[in-house]
Image (cartoon, rainbow, N blue to C red):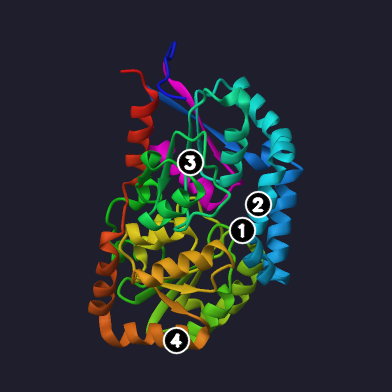
Amino acid sequence: MGTLHPAQYPLKVGLIYGCAPSGHYSAARALADFFPAAIIEPVFINLSEVYPNLGPFVAKTYLEVLKKTPFLWNYVYDNDFVAFASGALKNTVLSFYSQKLSALLTAKNIKAAVSTQALSAMLIAKSPALKNTPLFSVLTDFQAHSYWPAENVEGYFVPSKVTAQGLLKNGADPAKIFVTGIPVRKEFLAPRDRQAERKNLGLAPNLFTVLITGGSRGMGEIFSAVEALSPFFGRLQAMVMCGEDKTLARRLSRYTARKKRHLKIFEYTDTPGACYGAADLVVAKPGGVTVAETLSLGKPLIIFSPLPGQEELNSSFLLKNRLAELAKDGRQLQTLVRRRLDGGQRSCEYQARLPAAFSKPYAARDIVAIILEKIIKK
């Protein structure tokens, strides 16, 4: 690994993620926003397309485990014994799958790889054919689990010092760890006028506004959150981002028939920045990219129905650092929201100032700068 000697520009850099839409994909797109076109040509690589049978199987299994036996996922997510067992399989399973990804990257003339998901990083780090292809790992959760590869990585980009400690525990070289934050797209960089954004979205410009989101897949107890807040409709209005969950969108649309004036439903959107900009408060499950987007615009965050595993670990980090509050159920959500309504706008603005030290809206720019420095021959 090391500095590249390109025959010509632009260099092709692979941005590799697990599936789309997802937080990993959003992070990859955020990085692409900052690649200088004359020097770097980003090539998006979706593992679910590279491994059409493996990807849907893993995704379906993950969702079913979360739905039926969430305690099992909590156990598997970062269990030392499971990590040891998976390590024992690297010489067989990972070697088999890494060959296909290696062949694809070679065929596409990829000169460097950026992975926003652990599996793709493991596959590339394992491939002898890619030993001279610089690999960069971008972590999108606040605690690093044991599946991130400890070797054959040119640089790790992490949200916090806590994340870095997890990589060090795995055996990563400290000189290759950079605390940059989680990359967000350019639409989250500039301050947004709340009233203007509300008008554009068809909302009342002067009414306290709550954004409820379950990420790109619309996961979590979103309907329960809406029901909990419905007694406050009139004092507030709510936007709900359903992601790809069309069933949830239809269910909420029926509910909206009675609450139409104060509840606006959005299916999956590729440009969520306007909804965040319009909000006084965000209620969400704490996926890393969702949190980074919220912090980038200085919005207060209430965690609601975090998924087992990485999101519960994210919750612990956020609560410890006073970056969010946690509502364990609808009643607690009502209490936290009522406090903001009774405290007025000044209360929300105070809460929004708390995460300022942790907000890293230019993480994507900083990550790209380090990558360029490492791969371009001066």
Please give the residue where the numbered disc 1 appears in the rendered image. Answer: 80
Q: Is residue 179 above or below residue 104?
A: below
Q: Closer to the camera: disc 1 or disc 4?
A: 1
Separation (CA) of disc 4 from disc 3: 39 Å
Residue drawn at point x = 57 percent, y = 80 percent: 224
| Most foreground residue, 81 or 251 | 81
Please give the residue where the numbered disc 3 appears in the rendered image. Answer: 137
Whether the residues at callouts 1 and 3 have beta carbons within 8 Å, the answer is: no
Amino acid residing under circle 4: Gln
The range drawn in magenta is 9-36
- Could you tell which of marks 1 and 4 lies nearer the N-terminus? 1
- Could you tell which of marks 3 and 2 lies nearer the N-terminus? 2
Q: Closer to the camera: disc 3 or disc 2?
A: 2
Find residue 272 and report its horizontal and vertical position in percent. Answer: 45, 56
Residue drawn at point x = 26 percent, y = 82 percent: 344
- Could you tell which of marks 4 and 2 lies nearer the N-terminus? 2
Separation (CA) of disc 4 from disc 2: 43 Å
- Could you tell which of marks 4 and 3 lies nearer the N-terminus? 3
Amino acid residing under circle 3: Ser
Please give the residue where the numbered disc 2 appears in the rendered image. Answer: 84
| Most foreground residue, 92 or 233 | 92
Tell whether position 232 is magenta: no
Tell whether position 17 is magenta: yes
Q: Residue 334, which numbered label?
A: 4
Residue drawn at point x = 40 percent, y = 68 percent: 318
Considering the numbered disc 3 on the image, is that residue within a helix, a strand or a loop? strand
Separation (CA) of disc 1 from disc 4: 38 Å
